[in-house]
């Protein structure tokens, strides 16, 4: 979008160093910061976080036994 790290950091009211750590994966932004980034970059959180919902949904298999409702197992392939 053409923003510098400093411009984004100023928008988020954080230091440029903190924002740089978000970009490199050294730190993770909280949910409020993610919301602000989505507004700034005009995108969804899935797009921002590079989540392919349909692809990721196929990785999760839920095995639910109706005989024992407390026995819910989630298996990630």
Image (cartoon, grey):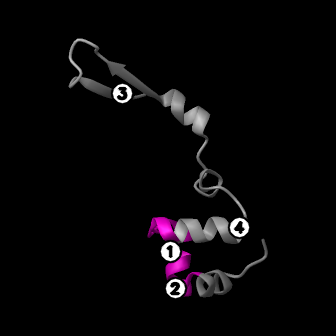
Residue under the point 59% across and 71% down: 36
Q: Earlier in the sequence, mark 4 or mark 3?
A: 4
Q: Nearer the viewer, mark 4 or mark 3?
A: 4
Query: What x and y, as percent, mark residue 3?
Result: 74, 79
Query: Is residue 3 depicted above or below 48 in this figure?
Result: below
**Do the CB atoms of the residues marked 4 and 1 lie less than 8 Å apart?**
no
Which residue is identified by label 2?
A: 14
Residue under the point 64% across and 87% down: 6
Residue under the point 52% across and 32% down: 57
The outermost residue toward the right is 2
Q: Nearer the viewer, mark 3 or mark 1?
A: 3
Whole-angstrom CA distance, mark 4 to mark 3, is 34 Å
Whole-angstrom CA distance, mark 4 to mark 2, is 17 Å
Q: Which mark is residue 75?
A: 3
Mark 1: which secondary structure? helix
Query: What x and y, as percent, mark residue 13?
Result: 54, 86
Q: Nearer the viewer, residue 31 or 8?
A: 31
Q: Nearer the viewer, mark 2 or mark 1?
A: 2
31 in the magenta segment: yes
Quadrant assignment for the C terminus = top left
Q: Residues within 10 Å of mark 3 (few under 14, many from 20)?
A: few
Q: Which residues are magenta?
A: 12-32
State left or right for residue 40 relative to residue 68.
right
Quadrant assignment for the N terminus = bottom right
Query: What x and y, as percent, mark residue 21?
Result: 50, 74
Which residue is identified by label 1?
A: 21
Which residue is identified by label 4?
A: 41
Q: Earlier in the sequence, mark 3 or mark 1?
A: 1
Q: Residues within 10 Å of mark 4 (few under 14, many from 20)?
A: few
């Amino acid at each position: 979008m053409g923003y510098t790290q400093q411009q984004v950091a100023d928008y988020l009211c954080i230091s440029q160093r903190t924002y740089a750590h978000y970009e490199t994966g050294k730190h993770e932004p909280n949910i409020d910061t993610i919301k602000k980034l989505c507004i700034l970059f005009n995108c969804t959180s899935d797009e921002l976080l590079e989540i392919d919902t349909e692809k990721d949904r196929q990785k999760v298999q839920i095995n639910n036994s109706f005989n024992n409702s407390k026995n819910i197992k989630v298996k990630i392939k």
